[in-house]
Image (cartoon, helix red, strand yellow):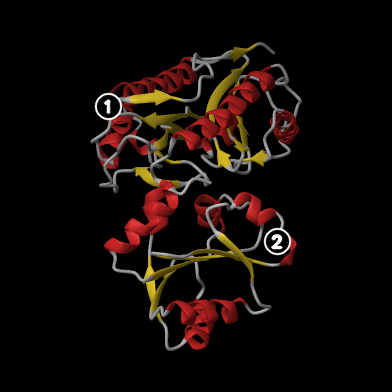
Amino acid sequence: MSTVRLNKLRQAMKERQLEAMFITSSVNRRYLTGFTGSAGYVIVTAEQAYLLTDFRYMTQAPEQAAAFTVAEHAPNVVDTIKELLSKWGVRSIGFEQDQVPYSRYAAYKQHLAPVELVPVSGMLESIRNFKDAEEIAIIEQATAIADRTYDHILSYIKPGVTEKELELEMEFFMRRQGASGPSFETIVASGVRSALPHGVASDKPIGHDEFITFDFGAIYNGYVSDLTRTVFVGTPSDRHREIYNVVLESQLHTLQYLKPGMSGKEADALSRDIITAHGYGDAYGHSAGHGIGLEVHEEPRLSKLSDTVLQPGMVVTVEPGIYIPGFGGVRIEDDVLITEDGIRILTHSSKEFTILPV
């Protein structure tokens, strides 16, 4: 793993006047060190960068975390941390307040005294907002797997097949394509269930004359993709066509005008204003998108509450939808890289209204 990420953390620590930083989040640990094991702690100062883990990983960790000193911690990791902080003369240390339960904080405070614990929120997450070339290349691999999976599942869709059977075929296919698993629990929602924004696959059989929404993604080398497409089985009514076309217009409009320097609030309005103008504003209850990376929901948010400014290197989803209880719903989603002068769309599955014969 490059030292660039470590240097970015040290700069952020300097700006916050932190002598040291204690990292317990598994996601932030992987991002910073490259270590993929299930257990470990990171301590960083201006001069030191340590990865503490147990005996199971004493071969793996040095191979993956070349920029870090790897040490096997004591049975109680706090004993090793206290020893290192004392040796380095550290008087205070930041900790990830959003990741540490109060009971663990209390134990750290007691055992590390007189070292002061300084709560820190979102520091590494803010650094992770900006994807480097290596991360973007991996995300593109994850999006390519999602695109191939969508193409693959179209031939399996027919009345009588259950949503869960489609989900299982999609997961098997993603794994065969090199994914370590799905980004999240795959959504396969058909008929009236397509009005459920998070309608995970059920035992419902695919019927006639209904929408099917697929919302899914692949984890590849730790990074995720997130793709949504809605298809139709049978003969769509005028209302079905109208809803689909409104969502597509909203999504395409957002992609056309999305750019760096725009706030998350402004990006959300690009999609929301179109749907509202067509009279479906009340049927669009979620945000227009969110960041993706090592996690499927990261900053920035494309939300009417977000003042975060979109900047080059951020990767976000664009996913407007309309959901009508008792009838059905449509969502269309792509993954997008914010560039210096606009965007680059990373997912390429067709968004034409796909109508499958029965």
Element at badge 1?
Answer: helix
**Of the residues under marks 1 and 2, which one precedes in the sequence?**
2
Residue 305: give x, y in percent of width and height. Answer: 29, 48
Q: Label 2 sits on what residue type?
A: Met
> What distance separates the C-alpha of mark 1 from that of mark 2?
59 Å
Badge 1 density bin: few <14, some 14–19, many ≥20, Cα 10 Å: few
- Residue, x 57% and y 49% (percent of image)? 34
- Front-most of residues 7 and 227: 7
- Front-most of residues 358 and 263: 263
Query: Dividing the picture into quarters, in which one does residue 272 lie?
Result: top left
Q: Label 1 sits on what residue type?
A: Ala
Q: Nearer the viewer, mark 1 or mark 2?
A: 2
Q: Is residue 316 left or right of residue 276?
A: right
Badge 2 density bin: few <14, some 14–19, many ≥20, Cα 10 Å: some
- Front-most of residues 52 and 30: 52
Residue 145: give x, y in percent of width and height. Answer: 62, 27
- Residue designated by label 2: 58
- Residue designated by label 1: 277
Element at badge 2?
Answer: loop
- The answer to whether residue 204 is above or below residue 79 is above
Residue 180: give x, y in percent of width and height. Answer: 68, 40
Give the total number of marks visible in the rendering.
2
- The answer to whether residue 226 is above or below residue 39 is above
Q: Is residue 48 left or right of residue 39?
A: left
- The answer to whether residue 341 is above or below residue 285 is above
Query: Dividing the picture into quarters, in which one does residue 256 lie?
Result: top left
Residue 55: give x, y in percent of width and height. Answer: 73, 66
- The answer to whether residue 358 is above or below residue 286 is above
Q: Is residue 327 visible?
A: no
Q: Is residue 280 visible?
A: yes
Q: Is residue 341 left or right of residue 28?
A: left
